[in-house]
Image (spheres, helix red, strand yellow):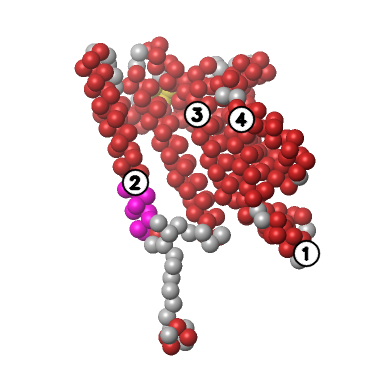
Amino acid sequence: MEALREGRSHFDFRPEKRRLLAKDLVNATLGVLLIIAIWWILAETMISLRGVAFPTPLEAFASLWQSLGGAEVNGENIYAHAQASLYRWGLGYVIALVLGVTIGLLFGTLNRLHDVGMVSIYILQMIPGLAWIPIAMLIFGLGESATVFIILVTVLPPVVINTAGGIRQVPPIHTRVALMSGKDRLSLFTKVLIPGAALSIITGMRLGLANGWRVLIAAEMVVGVAVGLGYSIFQSRYNLDFTAAFVSIIVICLIGLTIEKLLFVKLEDLVRNRLGLDRED
């Protein structure tokens, strides 16, 4: 007790970052190995029972290695396919984030606007991403603009819903205290409401990422683009090169996992740290 009073001792309740990182790495590795094991069993079963040339993980990863070395996949190298898909997804996703967060902030703070506007957002959320394809083609025709539009309208609803929900969950007392202390509306948003809703906003961004990435691949198959990961998968059915399709699927998964782990996990950890909510597991 004397040491504590004199400040010569202290307790540190922060989690061990190294232990958490190792645990996350082990969990991720086990999850990937489980998927590969299921894939391998399915491939061997199809080969044995139906005699089809179902690509095994070994064949797919060998082909992926060749593709990373520059070998073409359905007319282009894998880097060109990935770059084209990331450009379309990134453009639609960023536009949806800007619109979604802005609309969500308005809906979260203006009750009347929330009651009316959220009905429209819920309707948009119930429309499957692929259902937007004919509408996009009627408005924009074939090509890039149609794909970006499909991504935008698919990403927008979860971002708006989670942003508005996060804002409305901030305790009203925080708002009243901020206003009584002399903060203006801008400071209220930047210092109170947005930090309080940050984790919910990140959740909406994550859901939007998954929705947009999935619908991008499907849209590339049917809206007339000539390069992209979805286009590569679609072309594989005509070329009967199913290994190339699996190569594209692996790249899709790797890109999605990389964005999740390097962007959203780090962003969430940063926000939790700023809010004093570090993980204790």
Q: Residue at x 73, y 40 (%)?
A: 114
User: Which residue type carries mark 2?
Assistant: Asn
* Mark sitting earlier along the chain (3/4): 4
First in residue order: circle 1 vs circle 4: 4
Secondary structure state at the residue bearing disc 4: helix
Query: Which quarter of the figure has residue 196?
Result: bottom right
What amino acid is at disc 4? Gln
Q: Position of residue 115 (x, y in %)?
A: 73, 38
Q: Is residue 59 visible?
A: no
Q: Which residue is mark 2?
A: 27
Residue shown at the point (58%, 47%) measured from the top left = 200
- Secondary structure under the numbered disc 3 in the rendered image: helix
> The residue tagged with tag 1: helix, strand or loop?
helix
The picture quadrant where one finds residue 47 is: top left
Q: What numbered label is drawn on residue 237? A: none
User: Dot 1 corresponds to which residue?
Assistant: 180
The percent coordinates of residue 20 (x first, y second) are: 38, 56
Q: Main secondary structure of the magenta part?
A: helix
Label 4 sits on residue: 125
* Residue at the top extreme, as displayed: 238
Is residue 143 shown above or below 262?
above
Which contiguous range is marked in magenta? 18-26
**Mark 4 vs mark 2: in front:** 4
